[in-house]
Image: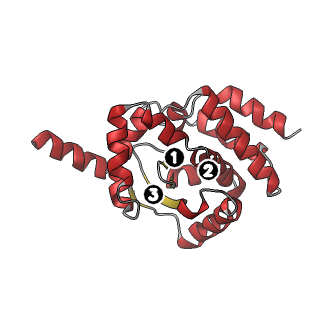
């Protein structure tokens, strides 16, 4: 019981309140709402900002439509287009329900997902289960390709270049801290292939 309590405390410390100023959050949220307004999952999509020194620059989707982006990812980005490119990719996973499809294949993670999504209105409950979900989650080559293609099409539909996705992926790779327990690239692999697809898509 003491070990479980320690683990719960550890998990709750993975994420802190975002330190990104309100004006910047509002700007990102406005652009995010613009690119996500016509999706089938739009009524369920929630964007949340969190700081996390444990996982660093990261973004991920929780089954049910919650997308979390860390302050560290926003700070690593050099433009709002790069932030949107990362969020467009996560929207691809949400729209195509990749997280849920993967969790169904893993009975333990499914139990966690059930607990996480039982009260989607409670973000704190969802965030508490994120460490386990991220450890379990490593998207397949096919899922990554599908989410990338979705993101590229979505960006271009709104007059944005997939080049921004390639730029931020290169920067994530160059700044990857191997001491972090979970990184964006550990759950979203095949970086070189994805960068090449993004640059080719822009031609």
* 158 horizontally vs 180: left or right: right
**What is the number of the mark on residue 138?**
none
In the displayed orientation, state which residue is furthest to the right.
Answer: 203
Q: Determine the secondary structure under disc 1.
A: strand
State the image coordinates of residue 66 (x, y, percent, origin top left). 49, 55
Give neighbour class at mark 2: few <14, some 14-19, many 20+ (Cα, 10 Å): many
Residue of label 2: 91
Q: What residue do we see at 68% from left, 49% from top?
A: 85
How are the residues colored?
secondary structure
User: CA gap, disc 3 to disc 1?
Assistant: 11 Å
Q: Nearer the viewer, residue 163 or 87?
A: 87
* 166 horizontally vs 76: left or right: right
Residue of label 1: 60
Q: What residue do we see at 56% from left, 34% from top?
A: 188
State the image coordinates of residue 87 (x, y, percent, origin top left). 62, 51
State the image coordinates of residue 199 (x, y, percent, origin top left). 80, 36
- Sequence order check, earlier mark of 3 and 2: 3
Q: Determine the secondary structure under disc 2.
A: helix
Q: Determine the secondary structure under disc 3.
A: strand
């Amino acid at each position: 019981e003491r070990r479980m309590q320690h683990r719960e405390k550890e998990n709750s410390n993975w994420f802190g309140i975002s330190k990104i100023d309100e004006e910047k959050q509002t700007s990102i949220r406005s652009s995010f709402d613009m690119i996500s307004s016509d999706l089938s999952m739009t009524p369920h999509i929630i964007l949340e900002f969190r700081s996390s020194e444990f996982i660093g620059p990261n973004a991920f989707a929780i089954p049910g439509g919650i997308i979390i982006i860390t302050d560290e990812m926003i700070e690593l980005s050099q433009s709002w287009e790069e932030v949107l490119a990362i969020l467009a990719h996560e929207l691809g996973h949400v729209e195509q329900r990749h997280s849920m499809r993967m969790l169904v294949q893993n009975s333990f993670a499914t139990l966690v997902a059930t607990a996480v999504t039982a009260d989607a209105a409670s973000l704190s409950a969802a965030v508490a289960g994120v460490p386990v979900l991220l450890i379990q989650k490593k998207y397949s080559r096919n899922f990554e390709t599908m989410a990338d293609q979705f993101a590229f099409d979505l960006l271009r539909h709104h007059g944005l270049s997939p080049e921004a996705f390639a730029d931020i992926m290169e920067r994530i790779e160059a700044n990857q801290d191997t001491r972090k327990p979970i990184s964006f690239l550990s759950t979203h692999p095949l970086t070189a292939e994805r960068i090449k697809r993004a640059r080719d898509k822009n031609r």
